[in-house]
Amino acid sequence: MIYFVLFVLFLSLFLYIALAGADLGAGILEIFKGKKLKEVQERMITRAMGPAWEANHIWLILVLVIMFVGFPKPFRLLSISLHIPITMILIGIIGRGTAFTFRHYDAVKDNSKFLYSIVFSFSSLWTSMWIGITVGAMTLGRITEEGDFYTVYISNWLNPFSFLMGLFISSLFAYVASTFMVAESKTYQTRELFKKRVVYSSTISVVLGTCLFIDSFFNPNIINEFLNDKITMTFLFCSTSILLFQWITIKKKMNYCLKFLGVIQLFLIFSAWVIFLYPNFYFRDGSIGVNIFSGAATDATIKQLTIALTIGVIVIFPPYVYLMNIFKRNP
């Protein structure tokens, strides 16, 4: 039963990263929209996110519920040690959600729309950065609830590796959003504009990924574990290889395929990260972190959680797919 719970946890986390990540990336793209087709880009991003954008947070809620009920020990540790990054993520989610709503529905035609756009775009970058910093802290594994304030709350995320991970995740979200926007484009001009964004963001992601790899050499336990993990290396190699197919797709003008390539790359990178940490929730400087199985709740709790998730999957997935289908139809 615990494997079913882990599968739903994995799937929910990936869906949040892919769908909400694309929304966050769309906000980041607004920062670099330039002067050409400025208003057209804003309308496209607003339409692409649409009224269904808030539904993406259902996956985040599901992840938190599964962790809280099914894995209370790691949930407690991560909530305590990563309290500051998690709080920053929540502040960013609230800021961008509020700005997006007011920008879209504010009836007053004044300069407030410009302010809302600024808050929305930079909150998107802020949220993406802190998601990446949290991922970096879990990868680095300095998670603890013992020691002074700096050791428990600061040192685990305030380091070059975590901030590089934040930049990498942000560029990755911008890349995925660019591939989605190419598929959403209805005109040649906007399609070519977002194709350039695909190339730029993927190039930046490769550069930042390389910087992360170089920085890993300053953390010997991580780099040794990584180099010995053949599955993780294979997944990352496959993800990088897709860049070749991306280039062919752009040259052949197979525009709709770009979106699927972006999602596949994100899935491979996410899977590599999960495999690298498995069977722990975070890496811990050569020793094990909190093991998934030793940190799980009692068998009775896992059984009840499995029943609830089975019902939940049946209830949630079909309406969600229908909702997305409705809002993607042309009026």
Image (cartoon, rainbow, N blue to C red):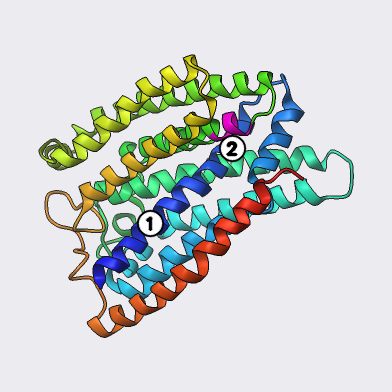
Q: Secondary structure at mark 1?
A: helix
* Three-letter code for the amino acid on which mark 2 is drawn: Ala
Residue bearing mark 2 = 26
Residue 9, horizontal then vertical, whole percent: 36, 62
Residue pushed farthest bottom?
Answer: 300
Q: Is residue 31 left or right of residue 61?
A: right
To which quarter of the image does residue 296 belong? bottom left
Q: Residue 221, can we see it?
A: yes
User: Is 183 a magenta residue?
Assistant: yes
- The residue shown at (26%, 34%) is 236
User: For the residues marked 2 and 1, what is the alpha-carbon distance in whole angstroms?
Assistant: 22 Å
Between residues 82 and 65, which one lies in front from this camera angle?
A: 65
Image position, residue 16 (x, y; %)? 47, 53
Look at the numbered discs 2 and 1 and tell me whether their residues touch, using CB distance below 8 Å: no
The residue lying at 74 percent from left, 29 percent from top is 40
Kindly identify which numbered label has been placed on residue 11: 1
